[in-house]
Amino acid sequence: MIAFSSAVTKPDVYRACAEPGIERAREADSVVHSPPAAGPISTAYNQLLDTAAELDDLEALVLVHQDAEIVDADLCATLRQALGDPDVGLIGCAGAVGVRSIAWWEGSVTLSSFANRYDEHGGGDLPGLSWKWEDPPPYARTGEVDTLDGFVLALSPWVVRNVRFDESLSPFHGYDLDFCLQVRAAGRKVVTADFQAIHHRPLEMVPDLEEWIDAHVLVAEKWDGRAPGIGAGTGTWKERARRAEAEADAARTMAYSRQLELRAREHYLRNAIAETTESVSWRITAPLRRLVRSR
Amino acid sequence: MIAFGTAITDSDEYRRHAQPGIRRTVEPDSEVYPFQAVGAVGRSNNLILDHAAESKELEALVLVDEKAEISDPDFCEKVRRAIGDPEVGAVGAVGATGGRSIAWWEGSVSCGAVTQRYPDYEGGEMPAFSWTERAPAPAEVEALDGLLLVLSPWAVRNVRFDEALSLGHGYEVDYCMQLRSAGKQVTTADFGVIHHRPLKVVDDLKLWAEAHIQLAEKWDDRLGGEHPDSDAWKQRARRAEAEREAAQTMAYSAASTLDAQLAPLERELAEATGTLAWRLTQPLRQANQWRRSRAGRRDSGGPR
């Protein structure tokens, strides 16, 4: 039996996003357990794991963020196939290798089969690199990764019964990397599989900067020297500080360039639209457009 | 006498931008030093300083970037007013306080009437540093933008650009720090300047990062006595690495947000220009375009 769980802090979000996806993917015998939650996600998730651990016939537990929507109706079949390898402990639809921090997307992303669906500016989707398989990049593939995005995680029964989220870390950020590292440290595989999900979330990725920075430091301190690459860097601490400070300023500068580009592009588009819709040819063909619209 | 100097790496840029501004601005007794750039920016600027220092009548030296066009009819008067205070060592059109690195714009920016004229997207103009809040000039600051630097005679004769900063970034921040270490003030003034440059703030971020490190090594003594592998450096490195990745992630967010903002306009334009009516009248627009360009050539006396 494949179970589904969410930690629900915003019932309306759960009903709009996670619930329809779970209903789409669940099987007749699936247990769905999505209780109200408060506090850190690691605490809420551990409670979900404790509950699921008592299910004798558990084949997998799928942890779904309340704002995540599973797209695939055949998710359970995909998970069973992945779990055919008894060493697999965790499965997700987005992950990377060469990861060095909680910013796992700064690693080498191998799969990203989700779309970020946002409401801002009239709404839209930002598809991940493998959201559609028509023309994937050459490095897109399923298989073993260093870490997964935690918005949809499928856990093997062994993991449900033997690994817990670290409640000493940040309330929200980096829990997924830490959990993947624990699973891998226990000798189990962390893998991506070919299923899709939609993440309904704003475009802003770091709304709480200080909390995110604290999480970054905590995870680096915990795993530096224990997991390859995590928290690692070349040179003395002084050299690393200097370089990181420079690169942080460079990243901010890059964002400023983008802002300027937006303003210029906006100006160009508005001019082009005005030129188009105020031109003689636009005005004389207005009856034709009306005719087309009326058909 | 107010002198003007430019280190020229691209003669066309100088002819198009700096030169017309200088010509409009010079007074009858002004000296102008247009020198071919030699080596790093610091060395080229020092060459100009060496020449200006020989002038006994020097009131101020204006270092004009080849892409900067002075657009201020009262420029010389403003220079005299700003540099009249003997405590002032340098005056610029843009500067900031609290930047703490070559990214001086991360501090509180003070800005005169400076605009950025860009070639991207068929060209346009916007206020300089429009991505951040800008207080109006004048203000005392810690660092100035190198686009236009007005130096006092004392500065010209006593302080040199650091030629060891060979990467082309941060030389102006270093010069301001030298002046302030010597007890001189650095201020902005309400100069009118047009900066002709693309939208990209920094061209080569890797080189820029190296220059950032170079200047930090020279001036940042917050942990000067600490061993390079001390706990203090470790804590600073951990935080800096986290901030770097946060900044990179926030840059992605910003890019996505900006794309989302533009998407409705892109759609509107595509819809307008994708209609059958628009396609049918394409020959008419082409004919009009040809007629306009032909008329333009005639007006400018170009070949027919």
Image: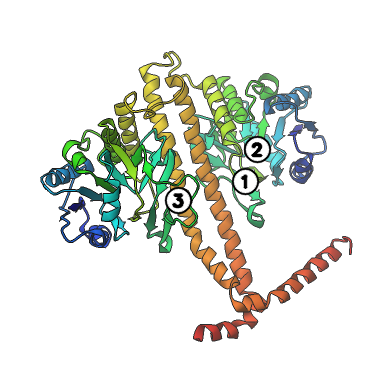
Q: Mark 1 points at which residue?
A: B114
Task: Give the number of the mark in front: 1 or 3.
Answer: 3
Helix, strand or loop status at disc 1? strand
Residue under circle 3? A129
Where is residue A200 shown, x and y percent of the image? 33, 56
The quadrant where residue A257 appears: top right
Residue sitting at 26 percent across and 57 percent down? A18
At x 36%, y 37%, the residue is: A146
Find out whether the residues at labels 3 and 2 contact each other: C-beta distance under 8 Å.
no
- Quadrant location of the N terminus of chain B in the rendered image: top right
Q: How far apart are marks 2 and 1 (CA)?
A: 10 Å
Around disc 3, counting alpha carbons within 10 Å, would you say few (fewer than 14), some (14 to 19), or many (20 or more)?
many
Residue holding disc 2: B147
User: Do the residues under discs 2 and 1 have CB atoms within 8 angstroms?
Assistant: yes
Q: Nearer the viewer, residue A213 or A158?
A: A158
Q: Position of residue A173 (x, y in %)?
A: 30, 40
Q: Eyeballing the image, is B112 above or below B158?
A: below
